[in-house]
Amino acid sequence: MSNPTIAIVGRPNVGKSTLFNRIAGERISIVEDTPGVTRDRIYATGEWLGREFSIIDTGGIELSDEPFMEQIKHQAEIAIEEADVIVFVASGKEGVTDADEFVSRILYKSNKPVILAVNKVDNPEMRNDIFEFYSLGLGEPYPVSGSHGLGLGDVLDEAVKHFSTDIEPEEEGIIKFSLIGRPNVGKSSLINAILGEERVIVSDIEGTTRDAVDTEFVDEEDQKYIMIDTAGMRKRGKVYESTEKYSVMRAMRAIERSDVVLFVINGEEGIREQDKRIAGYAHEAGRGMIIVVNKWDLVKKDTHTMKAFEEKIRDEFQYLDYAPIIFVSAETKQRLNRLPELIKEVSRNQSMRIPSALLNDVIMDAVAINPTPTDKGRRLKIFYSTQVAIKPPTFVVFVNEEELMHFSYSRFLENQIRKAFTFEGTPVRIISRRRK
């Protein structure tokens, strides 16, 4: 089950991005700050009152060559399609404008919960000026100040009330995996080739698939899978492929629901900047990862082509050094028979648990090989370690001073753990905690 989504909508210059950044900075915990992971501020994951949610900043959706009102309309429609709750932002300094009324009419017809946030209400005296916003017909206006962080809690309190409380029971033993990547890298073709039948429309036109497609199948060993096609995460309506950021939003929905992610690259076109953005989201989400180079049959090859392409992937995606790489062709079925077993292996590694005694032996051996670092005369001391979570495997290392655990030494410990245990295809998280 994917997280509920809040979309921030409104005309330009009302402070949508300021509110987004304020919520992101104060309420959202990023999994890790790993060098090389490309982030895009249009989409983030947060938590409020114990409920996780995704948040979209429609101000970051660039729709060029469109009239002013048409751009706002497109952004509002994207929010309506994608969001469970919409936060409509207006400006308390400027009052109700024609553009505000235009957006409110669109949102009023959406049948989605809409919370009206009047931004730039930076002092108590201005609260008396927000009552005119009742004229928009969207209910009570909430005074907020993005620049000072005031009133955001009231808005999030109201948003959480509209989150669904229904939790879908998940059948144990099913491996959920998705295919992510830029439009036209061959995700739908790969799905058809894996299934051996035409269940998804395949076309060379980017953004062909319109509906979310989940396909369940069983392999020869009776392992059940649910395959999620990220080519079409829209529920209905038009698709605005003029913005690449929108395809990232759709990929995020599928990543949230997946155990393992197949990151698909077009072997004929090579690596593009958006590939890094999409892969970065899957890595941050802690999902198992397999890098699939598709359309390999179309690449002119010699004896060094595959090795050179793999080296380029490792150079461009250094933070994905744990992910296996497989070169396939949806057209010729080349190496596709290896994918199910690879997915199962990565899924097993995601759920692996290491006994604390064995883990501490590995950590102590690592310290003997490479002594802990020092800073201004203080040396890092590691007391003990334990695994606290799976999917991804997460380890807490108890130390004397957390700030002495430098990123490079944490990475060294991760590498030693990977040498001792099979964690191919899954991120490994190491968290340092001061021993009380």
Image (tube, rainbow, N blue to C red):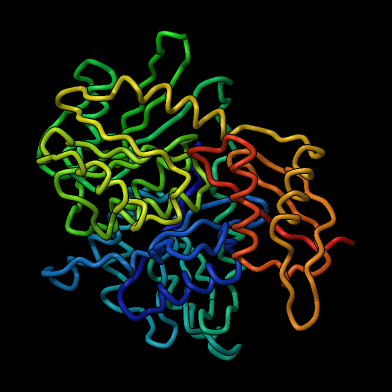
Q: Is residue 304 above or below residue 402?
A: above
* Residue sitting at x 75%, y 68%: 402
Asked whether 345 or 422 is in front, the reply is 422
Asked whether 18 or 435 is in front, the reply is 435
Q: How many marks?
A: 0
Image location of residue 246, percent across then percent down = 28, 54
Asked whether 147 or 183 is in front, the reply is 183
* Residue sitting at x 58%, y 78%: 149
Visible residue check, residue 194: yes
Image location of residue 110, percent across then percent down = 34, 50
Q: Is residue 173 above or below residue 100?
A: above
Asked whether 402 or 244 is in front, the reply is 402
Q: Is residue 223 left or right of residue 388?
A: left
Q: Is residue 357 left or right of residue 133?
A: right
* Residue sitting at x 59%, y 39%: 391
Q: Is residue 219 above or below residue 199?
A: above
Image location of residue 401, percent across then percent down = 79, 69
Visible residue check, residue 137: no
Give the quarter of the image for residue 389: top right
Image location of residue 185, percent across then percent down = 20, 42
Q: Is residue 28 left or right of residue 93?
A: right
Q: Residue furthest right?
A: 436
Give the quarter of the image for residue 330: top left
Give the quarter of the image for residue 168: top right
Q: Is residue 26 above or below residue 264?
A: below
